[in-house]
Amino acid sequence: MSVDTIAAIATGMTNSGIGIVRISGEESFTIIDKIYHSKSGKVLSQMMSHTIHYGHIYDGEQLVDEVMVSVMHAPHTYTGEDTVEINCHGGLYIVQKVLDTVLKYGARMAEPGEFSKRAFLNGKMDLSKAEAVMDLIHAKSEYAYQNSLHQLQGNLREKIKTCKEKIIYEIAFIESALDDPEHIDITGYSERLQEKVKELQMELTRLIASFQNGKIIKEGIKTVILGKPNAGKSSLLNVLLGEERAIVTDVEGTTRDVLEESVTLGGIKLVIMDTAGIRHTEDVVEKIGVEKAKEYAREADFIIYVVDASKPLDDNDSQICRLLHNKKSLVLLNKSDLQPMITKEEMTGKTGSEVISVSVKERQGIEEMAEKIQDMFLKGEINFNEDIMITNLRHKNLLDSALESLNQVQQSIENQMPEDFYSIDLMSAYASLGYIIGEEVEDDLVEEIFHKFCMGK
Ligand SMILES: Nc1nc2c(ncn2[C@@H]2O[C@H](COP(=O)(O)OP(=O)(O)OP(=O)(O)O)[C@@H](O)[C@H]2O)c(=O)[nH]1
Ligand SMILES: [Mg+2]
């Protein structure tokens, strides 16, 4: 393991009130002592752990910045190593200057995620926790935030560990029974094992099933707004975003391209796409827009079909209805502030979807829409304190293979195979689960996971 001292900018890459340069490793204090000066002549390496000190950073004779420096001694730090954090003025240029100074006096530039990788390697957190840190940073909705926060507290790890303990107990039993048949009686064992494996299978199946919610919570729902020209699609996008993102006019065919934005609605993230109004047209540019809209609709997780309820339905609507086929969708009967020409029943009949009446212009019905979407996508109530949700594809794949191995165990029991067959598959289920929390993970996987981290984390 490399024990050199690393440094990076831990705050964002924009100008802000303060910026933080983080240093971790054995040389952290040697480096800070060379560049930190205070009027009282403090030497930071002599200071108590978890204290913060006012002073200046110098590169030789040259003043770099006025700073506050946090001093944290190993092992009670994020990385488990000696750590120094320099809080400087938040201009990007200044923060970079401070970092350059730290590098000049002996630190090495950290790779993305290297602080967290060290935390993992020093046993400060397991792999699922490290991944939760990353998810937490990227969380864009309340649900995503809550879920990663709970994963960070280790509830996934606890669950996996319990499953692993149950498995290893059985493996140990089989092995010792085979070693010592005179003292350990194995008759009737396979029935007992069958029950225990069944419980584990149920447990894993539940976790795997949570991935659907988990994925939606983390990545958002790919949502396409469809409708005829002038139905109010772009107006809807703007209302959801709370800003005039898309051009809205009463000219049919205003939107030509696909506009993509993320919004959070009722705690769920929607990656929402406003499209060109669908109609038959000879206009070359508009035609391309209409084709694009259809293409995006085919790839969507969810379609919001906006209908101008003040106008009768026509052939173009029939075309849109065909695009809704086999898709999760919601129909908005828009412009409910005007005289209606279409009823809810009519639309339900045509689309088989839920229909709600709204007026985007007067912001009526948007709440109801948010609630509907939540009902449609999140199965049941989510209780973050009790439920564990899988949001990470790597975890899901490993759970799948653990479950597959347990299915094999059941198969072997049914086929009345000898006991040592059971332990082979139990062992691979055990290993798959271990990979989730980062036991027995090859170095390159660790490398790959931590590379997804931000700089300075
Ligand atoms: N009365 C009324 N007018 C609305 C409502 N929603 C949108 N409009 C108006 O309908 C017109 C068209 O709105 P847009 O949002 O541009 O419609 P669009 O579906 O994006 O149209 P294209 O981009 O041309 O496909 C604008 O004049 C809006 O102000 C509503 O709820 N009530
Ligand atoms: Mg539009």
Image (cartoon, rainbow, N blue to C red):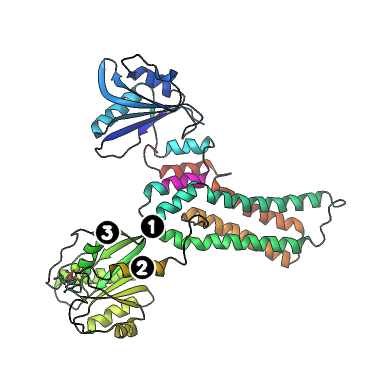
The residue at label 2 has a CB less than 8 Å from ligand 1: no
Q: Quadrant of ligand 2?
A: bottom left
Measured Cα–Cα span from mark 2 to mark 1: 19 Å
Identify which amino acid the numbered label 1 is placed on. Glu
Tag count = 3
Residue at which label 2 appears: 371
Residue located beneath label 1 in the image: 219
Task: Give the mark toward the camera: 2 or 3.
Answer: 2
Label 3, secondary structure: give it: strand
SS for dot 1:
helix
Q: Say which element carries label 2.
A: helix
Viewer-nearest residue: 328 or 87 = 87
Give the quarter of the figure containing the C terminus. top left
When the figure is inspected, residue 63 is found, relative to residue 346, above or below; the finding is above
What secondary structure predominates along the stretch shown in magenta?
Answer: helix
Magenta stretch in the rendered image = 123-134
Q: Is residue 336 magenta?
A: no
Depth check: give the residue in front, 232 or 52. Answer: 52
Residue holding disc 3: 261
Q: What amino acid is labelled 2 in the image?
A: Glu
Percent coordinates x, y for residue 395 in the rendering? 51, 54
